[in-house]
């Protein structure tokens, strides 16, 4: 077959590639500590599972509206109202199989060849991948360790041009665990409003905050006509396999995104949407207990990383990733990640997998047990000592 040229522009998500390599090592008999996949190691809350099972028994096995079941969209609107303090009409919401489609659809709907999209770097690799796929130019804005992995608003201002058609934000962030503070978020909003640039706010980790507060750009004047909020159920409710996400956006944008849904997925599985209603409206204790565990793991793992020669790590404020600086090991991110995998049998991701400004770092997901994290620290130390000679 002869493939379209655009297929060469489409990247991948390195976590799944490293997972395949780690599984191959396990097949050879090696014990691997998995810190590569950004997925809670907890099961979905019990009441969510029961709601999904009941929905299947009750016949929620048929096509539904492309934009999502009305009851779920109403529940999401109430949730957004309560957590962002903004008024949302359910018609502004499009439910999708996972949150990635919102990312894909938003970029596809707003950017075309010759346009530019500003995105965080290091950042989720699918941002750059999809920007390139639609023929637009990716314009990275560096996330700076000294600023808690926030961006420099003045630098962002300098990157804006008449070709800028979208700004992508992610807070709390993957891979850094950093959050954008209120003063920076306000500055970003002022830039977006002044130049009338839409903003895609990836807020999938909004409920995963340990220190400080979550600030949504939705709070600032003038953003209501420019903002697309991306959120979902995978992280907060450990529902990665259910594939349930959503976007909140202006009404005219929602109509376009719903048409993209019709042309690609038809609709999101009805029984998973019923489980989503249970997640939002039901007890939150299991999710809160999961977050308490993540905080305990974060504290122990980051403290352990900072005791290893050649490694320093900022305390992540949110999500479930540690993003240590490994420049003291005098090796590239890829060399360190390969050493960890093939010699230490710890699966991690090179910071460069998240963009050019990720070089000099490694990403660990601490969505694993304390026992396994402590074992990983022992192995990481051995690799660091070997690399330092």
Image: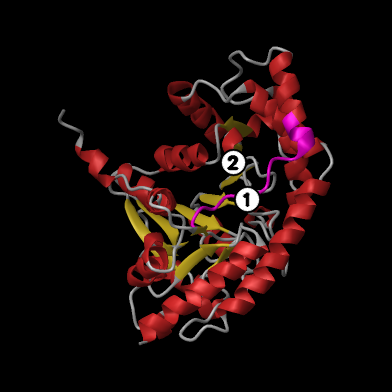
Q: In the visual, does 195 lie left or right of 87?
A: left
The residue carrying mark 1 is: 40
What colouring method underlies this structural image?
secondary structure
Q: At which x and y percent is residue 231?
A: 62, 44
In this picture, residue 49 sits left or right of residue 384: right
Q: How many marks?
A: 2
Question: Which label belongs to residue 240?
Answer: 2
- Which mark identifies residue 142? none
The quadrant of the image that shows the C terminus is bottom left
Residue situated in front as seen by the camera: 285 or 197: 285
Left or right placement of residue 14 versus residue 313 in this view: left
Compared with 361, 221 (above or below) is above
Q: Sequence order check: which comes first, mark 1 or mark 2?
A: 1
Main SS, magenta residues: loop
Residue 178 in view: no
User: Which range is magenta?
Assistant: 36-49
**Is there CB contact under 8 Å for labels 1 and 2?**
yes
Residue found 36% across the figure and 81% down from its top: 387
Residue 100 appears left or right of 215 = left
Residue 350: percent from the left, percent from the top? Answer: 40, 65
Q: Distance between the residues labelled 1 and 2?
A: 8 Å
Image coordinates of residue 351 in percent, x first then y, are 41, 66
Local packing at callout 2 (Cα closer than 10 Å; few below 14, some 14-19, many 20+) is some
Check the image and report above or below for 15 versus 250: below
């Amino acid at each position: 077959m002869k493939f379209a040229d655009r297929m060469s522009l489409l990247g991948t998500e390195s976590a799944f590639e490293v997972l395949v390599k780690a599984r191959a090592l396990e097949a050879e008999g090696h014990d691997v500590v998995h810190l590569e996949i950004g997925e809670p190691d907890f099961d979905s809350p019990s009441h969510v599972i029961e709601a999904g099972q009941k929905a299947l028994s009750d016949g929620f096995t048929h096509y539904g509206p492309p934009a999502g079941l009305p009851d779920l969209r109403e529940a999401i609107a109430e949730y957004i109202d309560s957590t962002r303090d903004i008024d949302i009409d359910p018609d502004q919401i499009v439910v999708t199989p996972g949150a990635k489609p919102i990312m894909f659809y938003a970029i596809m709907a707003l950017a075309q060849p010759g346009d530019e999209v500003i995105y965080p770097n290091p950042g989720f690799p699918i941002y750059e991948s999809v920007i390139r796929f639609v023929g637009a130019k990716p314009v990275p804005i560096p996330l700076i360790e000294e600023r808690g992995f926030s961006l420099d608003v003045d630098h962002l201002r300098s990157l804006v041009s008449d070709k800028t058609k979208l700004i992508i934000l992610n807070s709390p962030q993957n891979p850094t665990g950093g959050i954008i503070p209120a003063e920076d978020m306000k500055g970003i909003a002022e830039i977006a409003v002044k130049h009338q640039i839409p903003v895609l706010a990836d807020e999938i980790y909004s409920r995963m905050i340990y220190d400080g507060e979550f600030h949504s750009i939705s709070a600032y004047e003038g953003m209501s006509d420019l903002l697309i909020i991306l959120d979902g159920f995978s992280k907060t409710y450990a529902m990665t396999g259910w594939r349930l996400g959503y976007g909140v956006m202006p009404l005219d944008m929602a109509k376009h995104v719903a048409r993209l849904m019709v042309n690609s997925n038809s609709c999101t599985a009805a029984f998973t949407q019923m489980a989503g209603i249970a997640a939002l409206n039901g007890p939150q204790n299991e999710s809160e207990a999961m977050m308490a565990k993540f905080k305990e793991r974060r504290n122990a793992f980051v403290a352990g990383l900072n005791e290893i020669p050649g490694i320093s790590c900022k305390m992540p404020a949110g999500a479930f990733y540690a993003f240590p600086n490994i420049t003291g090991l005098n090796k590239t991110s890829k060399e360190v990640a390969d050493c960890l995998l093939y010699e230490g049998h710890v699966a991690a991701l090179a910071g460069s997998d998240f963009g050019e400004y990720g070089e000099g770092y490694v990403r660990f997901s601490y969505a694993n047990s304390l026992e396994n994290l402590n074992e990983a620290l022992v192995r990481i130390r051995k690799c660091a000592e070997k690399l330092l000679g």
